[in-house]
Structure formats: structure tokens, C-alpha cells
Image (cartoon, helix red, strand yellow):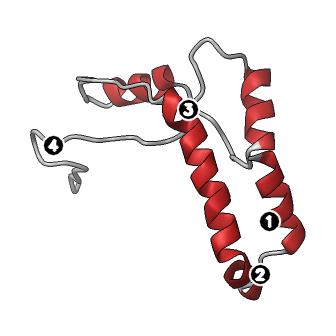
Amino acid sequence: MVERYLLRQGGAITFSDIMISDDATDADANVFAQVNAIMRLTKPSDYQRLLTSNGFESIHFEDWTQHLETNFVRMLEQIETYRIKLQASGVASSYLDDFAESL
């Protein structure tokens, strides 16, 4: 059996995913995911449970919810900045419009 390691001893994993509150319902998660073109939202506790069940130690968690609006504004700016290039590569104008509207 070959052992494979994700990290060297003492290494750290950082997640920067958009997550949903541990207090949110599955219905809340589905609505947010659909409106914001996100395939699936995971709760912080799900990540922590997965990591600890695989031998990792949770050292620190930061909630950056206050940055979500800035992130969405920047995504909208990227759509507009690269709209022509995106369309030239095959992204439908209606998709870009719908995505921008959801932001």
C-alpha cells in the first residue's frame, strides 16, 4: 500500500469557499445556490467534521461574511470587463446577463 500525504507535517489547509451558516436551512442554501450560480454550499461545521475525522486539527476559523458583497461586486466587474472575450469563447450572452442580474 502506498501512503499519500496532502501536507507535510505542520502544514495548513485554507478554505476560501463561499459557505452557508451552520444555522441556515437546506432550503436557504438551495435558494442562495440557485440565485448565485453555485453548485453546492457547505457549512463550516461540515468542513471541520470532515477534517477532524481525517486526523486534522482545526486551529482557527474566520468568518468573512462581511466581504461577500465586495466579492459579488468584483465578480460583476469581471463579467463586464471580459464580456466580449467570454462571448467569443462560447459563453452565451443570456448566461452572462442572468449571472450579472443574480449578483
Tell me which residue sits at (55%, 43%) in the image: 70
Q: Residue furthest bottom?
A: 88
Mark 4 vs mark 1, CA separation in Å: 39 Å
In the image, residue 93 sits, relative to residue 47, either above or below, namely below
Dividing the picture into quadrants, the one containing residue 34 is top right
Q: Which mark is residue 19?
A: 3
Q: Residue type at mark 2?
A: Gln
Which residue lies under the disc numbered 4? 11
Labels 1 and 3: the sequence-earlier one: 3
Instruction: Using the image as rendered, state which of residue 59 and residue 85 is in the foreground.
Output: 85
Mark 1 vs mark 2, CA separation in Å: 9 Å
From the image, state whether disc 1 or disc 3 is nearer to you. 1
Q: Is 60 placed left or right of 101 in the picture?
A: left
Tell me which residue sits at (83%, 51%) in the image: 101
Q: Residue furthest left?
A: 9
Marks 1 and 2: CB-CB under 8 Å?
A: yes
Labels 3 and 4: the sequence-earlier one: 4
Instruction: Using the image as rendered, state which of residue 2 and residue 62 is in the foreground.
Output: 62
From the image, state whether disc 2 or disc 4 is nearer to you. 2
Mark 3 vs mark 4, CA separation in Å: 23 Å
Labels 4 and 1: the sequence-earlier one: 4
Which residue lies under the disc numbered 1? 96
Mark 1 vs mark 3, CA separation in Å: 23 Å
From the image, state whether disc 4 or disc 1 is nearer to you. 1
Marks 1 and 3: CB-CB under 8 Å?
A: no
Dividing the picture into quadrants, the one containing residue 22 is top right
Q: The residue tagged with tag 3: helix, strand or loop?
A: loop
Assess disc 1: are there few (<14), some (14-19) or many (≥20) residues with their C-alpha within 10 Å of its C-alpha: some
In the image, residue 33 sits, relative to residue 93, either above or below, namely above
Q: The residue tagged with tag 2: helix, strand or loop?
A: helix
Q: Is 26 placed left or right of 3 in the picture?
A: right
Q: Which mark is residue 87?
A: 2
